[in-house]
């Protein structure tokens, strides 16, 4: 099923999504990679003010190419980053910040899936080869933060119909990655039996 959603998202919105659904997102989305997750959790624990609020919002595991100055930033290109590197931080980040959607590629682990089910959050996989479409969906680059983190700095962007994004991990505990892995292992066993029988 194809759905066009606008941020912020409610828990009801998110729990109504199922693996395999195609989503287009509009609204403010924040680029946030692994080291930025770690800093956010540390700063929150220390009571320090954070430069963003992602409650009921979406974060994007991606890298961007920005041009212009601080007052006139332009996103020339963005591409999804492999999400596995964020696995050590994502479960606690989801619980602490009540984020509703995580966008990236490659999927995430069972600990993250459990946090998503607990809080009401989905993993939206960017389809391979769609970086140009994602880049064109950027309406405005609102600003950056934590520039001292070099390539891992944060970016606030406004999107219109970012997608197509696939619901690959839903808020009901389902994961397309796990389903595909199980099918692959079953096929592997059958192939081995055929080879052994020849």
Image (tube, rainbow, N blue to C red):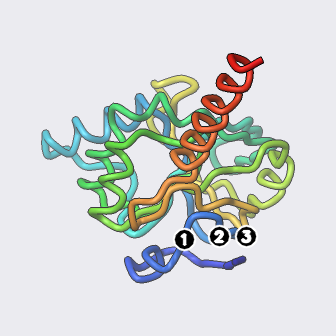
Residue 180 to residue 20: above or below: above
**Residue found at x 26% / y 40%:** 41
Q: Position of residue 121 (x, y in %)?
A: 41, 63
Neighbourhood count class around disc 2 (C-alpha, 10 Å): few under 14, some 14–19, many 20 upward? some
User: Residue under circle 1?
Assistant: 18
Q: Which residue is mark 3?
A: 160
Residue highlighted by disc 2: 21
Q: Earlier in the sequence, mark 2 or mark 3?
A: 2
Instruction: Kindly check if marks 2 and 3 are in contact, taking CB atoms under 8 A apart as contact.
Output: no
Which dot, 1 or 3, sits closer to the camera? 1
C-alpha separation, residue under disc 1 versus residue under disc 2: 6 Å
The local secondary structure at tag 3 comes to strand
Name the spot of residue 186 as percent of width and height, x first: 59, 38
Residue 101 visible at all: no
Mark 2 to mark 3: distance in Å? 18 Å
Q: Which quadrant is home to the N terminus?
A: bottom right
| Mark 2 or 3, closer to the camera | 2
Assess disc 3: are there few (<14), some (14-19) or many (≥20) residues with their C-alpha within 10 Å of its C-alpha.
some
- Tag 1, which secondary structure? loop
Do callouts 1 and 2 mark residues in contact (Cβ within 8 Å)? yes
For the C terminus, the quadrant is top right
């Amino acid at each position: 099923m194809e759905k066009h959603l606008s941020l912020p998202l409610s828990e009801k919105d998110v729990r109504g999504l199922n693996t395999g659904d195609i989503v287009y997102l509009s609204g403010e989305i924040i680029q946030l990679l692994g080291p930025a997750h770690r800093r956010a959790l540390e700063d929150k624990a220390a009571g320090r003010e954070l430069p963003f609020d992602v409650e009921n919002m979406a974060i994007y595991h991606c890298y961007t190419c920005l041009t212009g100055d601080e007052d006139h930033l332009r996103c020339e290109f963005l591409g999804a980053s492999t999400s596995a590197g964020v696995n050590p931080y994502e479960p606690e980040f989801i619980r602490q910040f009540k984020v509703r959607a995580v966008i990236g590629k490659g999927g995430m682990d069972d600990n993250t899936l459990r946090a998503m089910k607990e809080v009401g959050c989905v993993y939206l996989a960017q389809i391979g080869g769609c970086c140009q479409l994602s880049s064109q969906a950027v309406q405005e680059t609102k600003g950056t933060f934590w520039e001292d983190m070099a390539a891992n700095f944060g970016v606030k962007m406004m999107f219109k119909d970012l997608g197509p994004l696939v619901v690959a991990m839903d808020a009901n505990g389902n994961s397309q990655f796990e389903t595909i892995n199980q099918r692959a292992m079953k096929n592997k066993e059958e192939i081995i039996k055929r080879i052994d029988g020849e």
